[in-house]
Image (cartoon, rainbow, N blue to C red):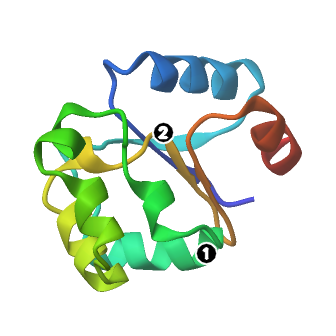
Amino acid sequence: MAKLLFIEYPKCSTCKRAKKWLDEHGVSYVDRHIVEENPTAAELAEWQARSGLPVRRFFNTSGQLYRQLGVKAQLDAGMSDAEAFDLLATNGMLVKRPLVVGADFVLVGFKEPEWSERLL
């Protein structure tokens, strides 16, 4: 199996739990800091397609920046997927984390049962 890409914000408590889970289960991964190396719009579009999830699931809805920019209202007003990817690519703090990117799947957020099913 090719190495997974684990995208995290190191200060995020959920990311810390997710990383600990990966380490405890012997899952190898390449670590990427979501703010220092923000995903590009093209990466996000590819990952969203691979995940099968709606683009809204890629937004960090509990983040301050999400609220400050009024992203929910923009999405509700009919923001296109392309516009959403462009917005997400402006700042890693807008992106839901952690992300696990595999060859044929993407996991958004840390849900242990989902991770166990896909990664173990």
Residue 52 lies, in percent from the top left, at: 65, 73
Residue 30 lies, in percent from the top left, at: 48, 45
Query: Residue at the location (37% across, 42% down)?
Result: 61
Q: Secondary structure at mark 2?
A: loop
Residue 15 lies, in percent from the top left, at: 47, 26
Quadrant of residue 105 within the rendered picture: bottom right
Can you see residue 61? yes
Q: Is residue 79 left or right of residue 103?
A: left
- First in sequence, mark 1 or 2: give its number: 1
Q: Is residue 110 left or right of residue 24?
A: left
Q: Is residue 68 left or right of residue 12?
A: left
Check contact, mark 1 vs mark 2: CB within 8 A. Answer: no
Q: Secondary structure at mark 1?
A: helix
Query: Residue at the location (78% across, 25% down)?
Result: 25
* Residue 98: mark: 2
- Viewer-nearest residue: 12 or 71: 71
Query: Residue at the location (61% across, 67% down)?
Result: 53
Q: Quadrant of the image for the C terminus? A: top right
Residue 8 lies, in percent from the top left, at: 39, 36
Distance from disc 1 to disc 2, alpha carbons, whole Å, reads 16 Å
- The residue that disc 1 covers is 50
Quadrant of residue 93 within the rendered picture: top left
Tell me the kind of residue under disc 1.
Answer: Arg
Can you see residue 35? no
Tell me the kind of residue under disc 2.
Answer: Pro
Q: Quadrant of the image for the N terminus? A: bottom right
Query: Residue at the location (47% across, 78% down)?
Result: 46
Q: Label 2 neighbourhood size at 10 Å, few (<14), some (14-19), many (20+)?
A: many
* Residue 32: mark: none
